[in-house]
Amino acid sequence: MSPVADAPRGRPPWIDVDWRAHLRWVPVRGRPVNVLDIGEGPVVVFLHGLSGCWQNWLESIPPLAGDHRVIAIDLPGFGESPMPAEPISVSGYARTVVDLLDALGVPEATIVGNSMGGFVGCEIAIRFPARVQRLVLVAPAGLSLRHMRHERKRGLRARAQNVLFFGLGRLARRTDVVVRSRRLRRALLLLVVAHPERLPGPLILEQARGAGKPGFDDALDAMTSYPIRDRLGEIGCPALVVWGEEDRLVPVRDAAEFEWLIPEARKILYPDTGHMAMLERPARFNADVRAFIQS
């Protein structure tokens, strides 16, 4: 498919889903976690990135939920989930996901993670290998620690971007001025999407729900202080690495590193695509994920 052909088009299936019927609070380690649980069949778990929420996967959930049980999580401190009782950490997030799967009666699953969620997915596959059948990493964080530490040192900039995202997100939920303005759409999704103007307005509105959450700073610190490179060779399940060639947030060169370091990994690069391939190229992404799960 061409980059334009596999971009979001027409009325998306997620618009017509009664999401409230599939959302629930699941107590995990003394705190409620907001969880979407829909469909029946082999289990696929979606993990969002920094400043994200379960709605980051809206374009992928309905196509997979037809013959899979799909679980999408607001990690503690993001989306609607409150901060965890203990300090945020990559290992803590991995333990939270596994405890949540225990609570839901899920022994094993395919884990799909974007950015920070990919980092957490790797940690789950390393520490709890029996729980992960397959691993899909969408521009995962974790390797470019030097770059991430540099951003951490420039914490004022990171916080300013989060505040900007939060402010525009609140505005987007109250009025259509953001989704109608090409300039404001670009500002709202500045770092994560190659062409914000190609995303439908309702989809942008849903992404704004991840803005300005309390876990941002602590999660950023947790990622930059938790090296994982030397442990990626311990991942024993098949892995698919998906990356946009125009990713402005995490360097696309890391795709080759993940492919090389994980024994059973292969990479796919999407042209003219940014950090969130699942939103920018949903048709291709969903087809690639389904083929990988069924291979």
Image (cartoon, rainbow, N blue to C red):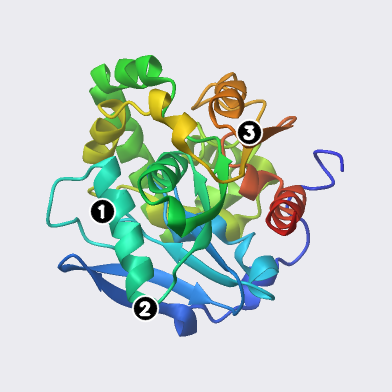
The percent coordinates of residue 150 (x first, y second) are 32, 15
Quadrant containing the N terminus is: top right
Residue 261 location (% of width, % of height):
53, 25
Tell me the CA gap for discs 2 and 1: 16 Å
Kindly state the secondary structure of the residue where label 3 is placed.
strand
Q: Is residue 108 shown above or below 180? A: below
Q: Point out the tag, 1 or 3, that comes first from the N-terminus.
A: 1
**Which image quadrant for residue 245?**
top right
Foreground residue among 236 and 16: 236
Residue type, label 2: Arg
Q: Determine the residue located farthest toward the bottom in the rendered image.
A: 21
Confirm whether residue 273 shows in the render.
no
Q: Name the residue under label 3.
A: 243
Q: Where is residue 75 in the image (x, y as percent from the top left)?
A: 33, 56
**249 displayed left or right of 59:** left
Residue 24: give its label.
2
Q: Quadrant of residue 15 in the image? A: bottom right
Q: Which tag, 2 or 3, sits closer to the chain's start?
A: 2
Q: Where is residue 270 in the image (x, y as percent from the top left)?
A: 72, 34
Q: What residue is pinned by disc 1?
A: 77
Residue at x 35%, y 32% (from the top left corner):
161
Q: In this view, does 33 lie to the left or right of 165?
A: left
Q: Camera-side residue: 203 or 244? A: 244
Depth check, front residue: 182 or 153: 153
* Mark 1 neighbour class, 10 Å CA radius: few under 14, some 14 to 19, many 20 or more: many
> Which residue is nearer to you in this view: 41 or 237?
237
Q: Relative to 41, does residue 109 appear above or below in the rendering? A: above
Q: What residue type is labelled 3?
A: Trp
